[in-house]
Image: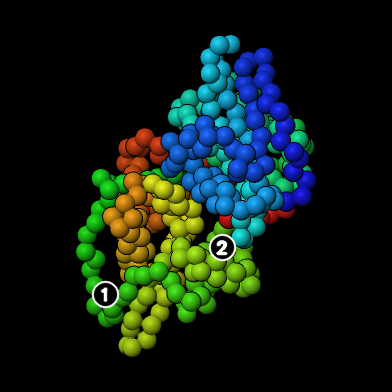
Amino acid sequence: MPGIAQPQPVRASTRGIYISTYTSARSIPLSVWTTLQENERAANVILPHALASLDKEDVPGQLWITCKTALTPDAEPELEFILSCSEWHMGTYPIFIISTLPTSCLAPAFLAPRVAMLTAELQACIPTERAYSIFAPAPLAKAFAQAWSNVTGVELEDHPYYAARFSHCSRKTFVDRSQTLPYDCTYNLRLACEGDIPHVAELCKGFASDSDPFILDDAGALKEANYLVSNKIAWVHEVIQNNSSHIACLVATTRNGVNVGTITKVFTHPAWRKRGCAERLVRKVCRNFLITQGKQWVVLYVAHNNPAAAKVYDKVGFTGLCGKPRAEGVDDWIEIGCRGAQIGHW
């Protein structure tokens, strides 16, 4: 990504707020990596990509900004926010921001000085049009987006691109059970293979068609399908009916860490809906993450306007959905769009 400036020196405000900027994963200090690992569930939008960047030489288009606060002049500053501005195979990511604090702590008066310094630093490092959206816990996203609009003059979209509940499933909450066999067919739940790529592309395009403004044309969907399949992060629900094979459902898992697996895309072909395909495949993927790979958590985001998906995830064991009490770490996230920016894809 052109236009990223060199790292700025650490700066402190009169309130003891410290901002640091890094333009390579290798320059990120151990203390930040430790904090990301300690917050691995929420950090699914930042940590896996940052780790992958460690193995590459001087990857362009990568930027991380941290915000720390020292409560007293002699105290060690505590890391509170981590912002990323990065790219992947399909283009640029939104501006991701995670907090190490509970959402209940993100009051406007607390956020205001910290967000002001983060937005000023980001504005100094990237072209304004690079920030096409901000995705973060809802109070943080709203405060940052408004501050970004104030300092850049960028108008915000009237409606969020995405508003979702962040949920997680663990071995303790996972509901593992045998699935009812469809009466007229058999099925196979498996990683996608090269021969599945055209079908995976069709499902990628279908998923994107409901994700405005992140629409994919045929070429873009094929590019994404190739990436998912070649990296073994696409699972499919194959249905065999009358000696004919059909790919009924897709689950993609594009952001995975040491202890956390992330489900990033679930889409069922319209012809195979209401047959339990999504629940069957999501359960298979969770079983693979939690039991086979031994991860501690599987996480995902489910849109507030998609109660059917929330019902599926609730049946598999994801917490805080369908009106049930929220567990720790189950929060509302929001993606706020910026008008006139160069739209990426994620």
Q: Which residue is mark 2?
A: 208
Residue 212 appears left or right of 288: right
Residue 205 lies, in percent from the top left, at 56, 68
Q: Which mark is residue 182?
A: 1
Q: Distance of mark 2 from mark 1, alpha carbons?
A: 28 Å
Q: Residue furthest bottom?
A: 243
Mark with earlier residue (2, 1): 1
Residue 86 lies, in percent from the top left, at 63, 48
Residue 180 lies, in percent from the top left, at 23, 68
Q: Is residue 280 visible?
A: yes
Q: Which residue corresponds to the image point at 71% horizontal and 36% vertical from the top-left?
A: 7
Residue 17 appears left or right of 312: right
Q: What's the residue type where badge 1 is placed? A: Pro
Compared to residue 214, the image places residue 30 above or below, namely above
Q: Is residue 203 visible?
A: no
Colour basis: rainbow
Q: What's the residue type where badge 2 is placed? A: Ala
Mark 2, other Cα within 10 Å: few <14 / some 14–19 / many ≥20: many
Query: Which quadrant would the C terminus be assigned to in this image?
Result: bottom right
Mark 1, other Cα within 10 Å: few <14 / some 14–19 / many ≥20: few
Q: Which residue corresponds to the image point at 26% horizontal and 74% vertical from the top-left?
A: 182
Q: Which mark is residue 93?
A: none
Residue 22, quarter of picture: top right
Residue 90 lies, in percent from the top left, at 62, 60
Compared to residue 15, the image places residue 200 above or below, namely below
Q: Which residue corresponds to the image point at 60% horizontal and 69% vertical from the top-left?
A: 223
Q: Nearer the viewer, residue 216 or 125?
A: 125
Q: Which residue corresponds to the image point at 53% horizontal and 14% vertical from the top-left?
A: 75
Residue 183 appears left or right of 200: left
